[in-house]
Each structure stands twice: as C-alpha cells, then as structure tokens.
Amino acid sequence: METKEIIVRVATNLDTHFAQRITDEMESSAKARGTGIAKRSPEYVAGKMLDGKAVIAETRLGQWVGFCYIEAWSHGKFVANSGLIVAPEFRKSGVAKTIKKRIFELSRIMYPDSKIFGLTTGLAVMKINSDLGYEPVTYSELTDDEEFWAGCKSCVNYDILMSKDRKNCMCTAMLYDPADHFKPEETAQDFKKKSKLYERFMKIKQSRLLNIFRKKENGNGGGAAIKPKSLLHQIFNL
C-alpha cells in the first residue's frame, strides 16, 4: 500500500533500527500535546516488528515516516492497535489514516474474531477509527486484562483513571466488534454465487417447462389448453 512516495507495509526484522527513533517520537509527541501515553521501550517495539505485529511507513529512500503495532489482550479476545506515531515532517499528509487502515487490516487477518479497541485523546484518531467502523463505548466494554491497565501507569492521567475505578479517564474508548460488521466484498461474492445458482435454477425450470408444455401439447392432439395450476404444480414439484 502506498501514499505518493511513502510505502506503508508490515514491519520486519530489517526495521528494528527504527525502534529508538519511534519511542523517542512517541514520548516527545505526547509531551507536546500535553497528554498521557503508555510508554514502550525500544526493545518492546522491536519485538513487535520481529513478531510481524507492526506496520511501518517509510519513504522510497528509507526515511522513517510512521508506525503502529498490535497488542492482544484477554487471551486474544481483545486486540488494540497501539502506538500510532508519525514523524513531524509528515503529519497532516494523510499517512496516519493509511497506517491505521493497514494495521486494522493486519489485526483482522491475525485475529479475525477479536474485538479491536483503542483509547485516544486525539480527535483525528477518533475520526479515523470511526471511518473504520469503531464506535465510542464505555470502559466497561474493554478488556479487563490487568496487564493492559498496568500499562497506563506511565500515563500522566493514571491517577484520574484510578480515581474513577477505571471506568473513565481523559481518553475516549472506541471499539470495533466483528460480530456487528460484515465485509462488503464477501457479501458481493455471496450475492454473485447465489445469483448464478438462481440463474441456473431458472434455466432448468424453463427447460422443464418447455418439455412439459410440448408433451401436454402432443398428448392432447396439439390443441388442448393446459391448466395453469396443474402446470405450476408439475414445475415446482419436479
């Protein structure tokens, strides 16, 4: 998947040298916005690349552009697309949306039955999530995995989260539930299959109808009329 000169793809072991730059940018970006962030180490980010659970964006010349990764919680029942970050010089270019779409697609492939959720304070990310099918939800609809919530300890808003008994905080919770969605392409394929079957069925029925009509015509001296109800009964009970 490409956006002009930018390539957005699944990260590999060849991208681990970007890990330090990515985590540094995550932290500085959060400070600039005055918002919280669950800190991740370069080793953690590199591990996601090695596991094939991350998406990276770079220019054709190899300049780092952006990143996002997948985290699975509650034994895979929930999945989060976390750590979305874009290099300052490439912000407002639309690449964040492309990265989010690619990591979302990767999540659906790796965890097709999992609910995908996110916590964010960014309006732009909320808009992207909404376009992908996420809906705003209460915190109670997210994972209850203690390890996930422990990751919030490094966030400046952690005290607020705990004072609300983890029921609310500065972030907006959004959730994509695959049980509430369908893939348009699958629906189209299914429709085509059914259409072909119906078309074949009608051709067979028409052929049978013609044969019945000829037999009736020959058996009745060529001039007897066929009772409609009798003919329909024969057709649909063959």
Image: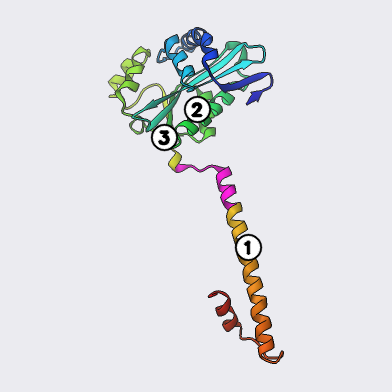
Q: Quadrant of residue 72?
A: top left
Where does label 1 land, which residue? 200
Q: Earlier in the sequence, mark 1 or mark 3?
A: 3
Nearer to the camera, 132 or 158: 132
Q: Secondary structure at mark 1?
A: helix
- The disc placed on residue 126 is 2
**Residue 139 versus residue 218 in the image, above or below:** above
**Residue 235 versus residue 16 in the image, above or below:** below
Q: Looking at the image, which residue is at 42% across and 15% down?
A: 37
Where does label 3 land, which residue? 114
Q: Earlier in the sequence, mark 2 or mark 1?
A: 2
Q: Which residues fall within the magenta stretch? A: 180-191
Residue 65 lies left or right of residue 48; in this view the side is right
Per the model, the C-alpha gap separating discs 1 and 3 is 38 Å
Q: Looking at the image, which residue is at 31% across and 15% down?
A: 159
Give the label, 3 or 2, closer to the camera.
3
Residue 42 lies left or right of residue 202; in this view the side is left
Per the model, the C-alpha gap separating discs 3 and 2 is 20 Å
